[in-house]
Amino acid sequence: MRIPFGFRIGLAGAIPIALIALSFVSCSANSESNTFNQGGGGGGNEEGGTATDGSAANSGGPLFEASTGDGQLDEESACVGQSFPGKLAPLDVYILLDATGSMQGSNNSPVVWPSVVAALKDIISDPLSSGIGVGLTYLPNQPPPTTVIPGSCKPGGDCGALGLCEFIGIAFACTSACTKNEDCGLYGPCMPWMTPKTPNARVCNGALVPKVSCDPLDYGQPVVPIAPLPGNKDALVQAINDKDPDGDATPTQPSLEGTLIYAKQYAKDNPTHLVHVLFATDGEPNNCTFNTIDGAAVAAATAFSNPPSVPTFVLGIGDLKDLNAIAKAGGTGDAYLANGSTVASQLVTVFNEIRASGACQFQIPEPESGQTLDFDRVNVYYTPLASSEKVPVKYVNDAASCDPKEGGWYYDDPSKTNPTKILLCPATCEGVKLSEEGVEVLLGCKTILK
């Protein structure tokens, strides 16, 4: 079936993406294929009949003829059976949204919060977003009440060997709290500061912004858990309406690390899903000992490269080209950069990319009860545009093995230990997007190898 590129959301215009039909085919057992047999009702034999699910079986002979691993026809292994409609892998988007005061115009920053939240609400309210799972979390978070921030003190407090408790910037801090970053733990860096009483003060930066956690474990838990739209719409809209963007700092690295830990676990708990993180921010990392673009990029790379893969999309609001490093490491190319007037359209573009990323990733069909799926006996077929005949797609080990012209398909787990998805190589994916018939998966016959 043809799949137009793009997707309509709210103010973006009409550009829908259609779903690809995936069919599952079982095979009759013989010397080449002895794992599956549709059985029951005569489904798929030469006289036709009814499949076990009551649907009409094919008539007039085998639906497919099986090929051996080298692509040669194996007459003794002709596959017959009933095709079943399948599903694309479900899409989930977990949003990490910057809710610092700068989003609302503090410190002479442009006011972008209204544009961002209006665009988000348009996206989650659009009927064409139905079925996509969306969840939401924010940065920064406050540390738990029991957290001890090195060098932090209360008015009139006694810092002892750590100097005097003085008001520094926006909070009280001990004036001799550190000599090096390690003295501050997560809540550095150790900073020189001049005060009326202590011209050579050295303070832990975290003490100056005590309402900002620098611990990745304090991030990632959802304000609104991931759940499909439109059912999750009201909870998301309410959470957005209730949020006051008043955070004091931008802990990019720890907040992204915590968010990716959560998203990774969610992907493990939902192995058939495609889980994505969308990080939207208007600031560079500040505050915290371990809080750099490079550190955030390492977290994004780890989440993307290790199964289950979780890519990170980045929306930067302002001149934040450094964020490209996070997006590249997270497998999504450059960051999407916007200003107050373009943030809505760029947010729509990001969601379109996320939707398009699932167009050629399929769930692996579940065998009948009591049967075991042999991952070396799975084949993929599709019907090219302007053709009436299905063609086999050859199996390759991984994305790096994809042929730029012939394409191919592979599992999300090259070891075949526990794959959960069938992925099409780019060349095959482009052909499938133009196909009128979509994709079919044949179970039980020796995989056709590249």
Image (cartoon, grey):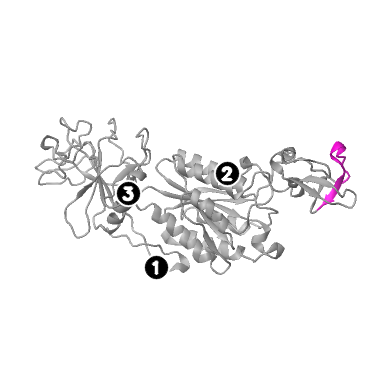
Comparing marks 3 and 2, which lies closer to the viewer? 3
Q: Residue at x 76, y 49 (%)?
A: 208
Q: Nearer the viewer, residue 303 or 30?
A: 303
Q: Is residue 163 magenta?
A: yes
Q: Secondary structure at mark 1?
A: loop
In this rendering, does residue 278 appear at all? no
Q: Is residue 113 rendered to the left or right of residue 363?
A: right
Residue 219: image location, x then y, percent:
61, 44
Q: Residue at x 29, y 31 (%)?
A: 372
User: What amino acid type should be assigned to the residue bearing mark 3?
Assistant: Cys
Query: Where, quadrant-wise, is the N terminus in this rendering?
Result: bottom left
Residue holding disc 3: 425
376 above or below 237?
above
Comparing marks 1 and 3, which lies closer to the viewer? 3
Residue 405: image location, x then y, percent:
27, 52
Q: Residue at x 33, y 62 (%)?
A: 4
Marks 1 and 2 close (CB-CB < 8 Å): no
Residue 281: image location, x then y, percent:
59, 57
Q: Residues within 10 Å of mark 2 (few under 14, many from 20)?
A: many
Q: Residues within 10 Å of mark 3 (few under 14, many from 20)?
A: many
| Of pointers 1 and 2, the one earlier in the residue sequence | 1
Residue 116: image location, x then y, percent:
57, 62
Label 3, label 2: how far apart the Cα atoms are: 30 Å
Query: Where, quadrant-wise, is the C terminus in this rendering?
Result: top left
Comparing marks 1 and 2, which lies closer to the viewer? 2
Residue holding disc 1: 14
Label 1, label 2: how far apart the Cα atoms are: 36 Å
| Of pointers 1 and 3, the one earlier in the residue sequence | 1
Residue holding disc 2: 257
User: What amino acid type should be assigned to the residue bearing mark 1?
Assistant: Ala
Q: Nearer the viewer, residue 421 or 58?
A: 421
